[in-house]
Amino acid sequence: MRNCFASLCLVLAIGLPNAFADGSSGLRGTARGPGDIDAKVGLPKEIQDKIGIDQKLGGQVPLQLEFVDESGKTVKLADFFTGGKPVIFVPAYYRCRLICNRVLDGMFDGLKRIDAKFRPSDHFEVVVLSMDPTENAEHAGNKKESMLSTLGRRRSVGGWHFLTGSEANIKQVMDSVGYRYIYDEKRSEYLHATGIMILTPEGIVSRYLMGIRYMPTDLELSLVESSKNNIGTLADQIKLLCYAYDPRSGQYNLIVIRMVQAGALATIFSIVFFWFWSPLVGLFRGSEKVRVVIKSAEVSATDVQPNSVGSSHERQA
């Protein structure tokens, strides 16, 4: 029995790390998610090659760079990476007529659906950076006001940051997350892919969520993972065991084998618990019985002793 148990532990010890690894560490290449593909539909080939998202998982975002926030204050990216919280990074520009609004709307809608559990400022920060160096704090402030008003959050603006900056600084940040875009002179607009990035508290690129719609599960799991367990509950950690992040689609997929292995792991823990706990319980109960017997003997001895003394006096009399 013990040999079988040891063999099962060995199999799971070898299999679980491989099953739980998402294989995305260090992946570099053009994303194949909807955010990369949909944005290129109808564009000439020479333009398609210039826009996209090259995933740089594990890459470092330059936190020392300075930008201007929606209030006109000069800030560093590092100012938003505090308290061990992950950061949702959103490339956009504020005068965009269509795609950027859909990205922001999709993100806001997704965050509303997890608002009871995770909230900006409390659990994470949101940083929106304009790719247009001609935009300023007024554009950023107007966009922030309009977006937060749709959430009914005019009084609760903590955790939301809308930035503008110089072309050089913008490009450094966009390059660090693999975000490629161009300005189309004919259309007088920027052409770009769609997606958001989840960064660790240290500014490391952790996850890409592609497209313009972000499912609550994807947002929750990516935030928990990127936070390095600084946020979330034990239930979230268990949930992570049953999902795998697909860097190509930028989504979390339920993996049946992980559910089976997680269940097997829980079973093993239960067996180990009862295996070692049962003898302890028996020992504890045994010691309790011994104490009861000793206590009973002491009580009996106490009851008997006076009678014995009395009988001795009676005999002497």
Image (cartoon, grey):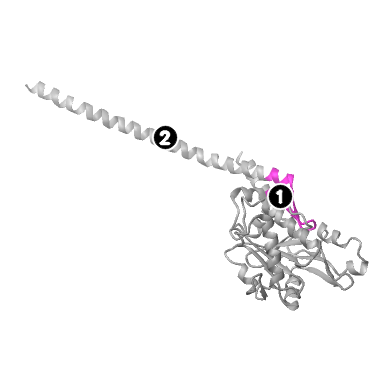
Highlighted range, magenta:
241-261
Residue 19 appears in the rendering: no
Q: Quadrant of the N terminus?
A: top right
Answer with left or right where residue 113 lies relative to residue 185.
Answer: left
Q: Which of marks 2 and 1 is in front?
A: 1
Q: Name the residue under label 2.
A: 286
Which of 171/222 is in front? Answer: 171
- The reply to whether callout 2 and callout 1 are in contact (CB within 8 Å) is no
Residue count near mark 2 (Cα–Cα under 10 Å), binned few <14, some 14–19, many ≥20: few
Between the residue at mark 2 and the residue at mark 1, the CA separation in whole angstroms equals 46 Å
In front of the other: 202 or 113: 113
> Where is residue 75 shown, x and y percent of the image?
63, 74
Which residue occupies 27% across, 32% down?
298
- What residue is pinned by disc 1? 243
Which amino acid, mark 1?
Answer: Tyr
Q: Where is residue 188 in the image (x, y as percent from the top left)?
A: 85, 71
* Helix, strand or loop for disc 2: helix
Q: In this view, does 234 lie to the left or right of 287?
A: right
Type of the residue with mark 2 = Gly
Q: Please identify the quadrant where the C terminus is shown.
A: top left
Q: Where is residue 97 in the image (x, y as percent from the top left)?
A: 81, 64
Q: Is residue 310 above or below residue 189?
A: above
Place residue 169 in its image quadrant.
Answer: bottom right
Identify the residue shown where x is 12% and y is 24%.
312
Element on which disc 1 rests: strand
Say whether residue 102 is visible.
yes
Whether 28 is among the magenta residues is: no
Q: Is residue 244 magenta?
A: yes
Q: In this view, does 101 lie to the left or right of 79?
A: right
Task: Please tell me which residue is depicted at 58% across the width and 58% down the height of the picture.
Answer: 122
